[in-house]
Image: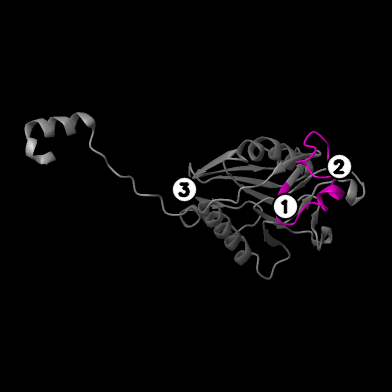
Amino acid sequence: MNHPKENPQRKFTYADYLTWPEDERWELIDGEPFDMTPAPSVDHQFIVGRLHRFFDEFLEGKTCHAYVAPFDVRVPKGDEADGEIDTVVQPDVVVICDEDHLDQRGLRGAPDLAVEVLSPSTASKDQIRKRRLYERSGVKEFWVVHPTDRMVMISRRTTRGVFGKTEYFEADAKIKVGLFPGLVIDLNRVFPPAPKREVRESPRKYLARKTSNPSASR
């Protein structure tokens, strides 16, 4: 039984992962499978598309390239064979500068920059487990985007080899991307327009108006 729905307690590898149906999306972290369904929301995809465009246009003609999910990132713990790797993730956007680690299946190793746009079903995993994973694997910059809170959290690798203090950016901020001098991302162009809030009359005011003017409710 190589499918996680048949044996959810088992630890899996990349060799197992390759046998699963192509119309299903999964991630593996230390052998533990995570179901990536249902499909992301419209806002999620809007943000992913905008961020990828910013990176892709800036990196045109340069040695680094931006890729968008679904894109497999295989994270080995050492020099084990591909089939024995037990961690395979799909960040929403990645930037890769060392293309020697690329092949037709994706990336083996750590991207230079990884972006995760939160969904309700993945928020805890993306903010906690993936942050640890990206830190230990050598990611230089990790972005977490909150579509509902309209906020971006960025962790940057320090000279000590660990992530420094998380930086917070609200939706009206302009982010200077530390890895790529000259690239500034205006979050006003990343988040979809905020929905207009409908202003409702409070029950007390409604009852007072109705009592003073009974004909208003007819």
Q: Earlier in the sequence, mark 3 or mark 1?
A: 1
At x 48%, y 49%, the residue is 173
Disc 3 marks which amino acid? Ala
Any mark on residue 77, and which?
2
The residue positioned farthest toward the bottom in the image shown: 61
Q: Magenta stretch?
A: 1-26
Residue 19, position as x, y percentages in the image: 83, 52
- For the residues carrying marks 2 and 1, which lies nearer the camera in this image? 2
Principal SS element in the magenta part?
Answer: loop
Position of the N terminus, as image quadrant, is top right
Question: Of 134 and 21, which appears nearest the observer?
Answer: 21
Task: Name the residue tied to disc 1.
Answer: 112
Q: Secondary structure at mark 2?
A: loop
Does the magenta-highlighted stretch encompass residue 98?
no
Classify 10 Å Cα crowding around label 1: few (below 14), some (14-19), many (20 and above): some
Residue 17, position as x, y percentages in the image: 81, 49
Does the magenta-highlighted stretch encompass residue 17?
yes
Classify 10 Å Cα crowding around label 2: few (below 14), some (14-19), many (20 and above): some
Q: Secondary structure at mark 1?
A: loop
Question: Of 144 and 181, which appears nearest the observer?
Answer: 144
How is the model colour-coded?
one colour
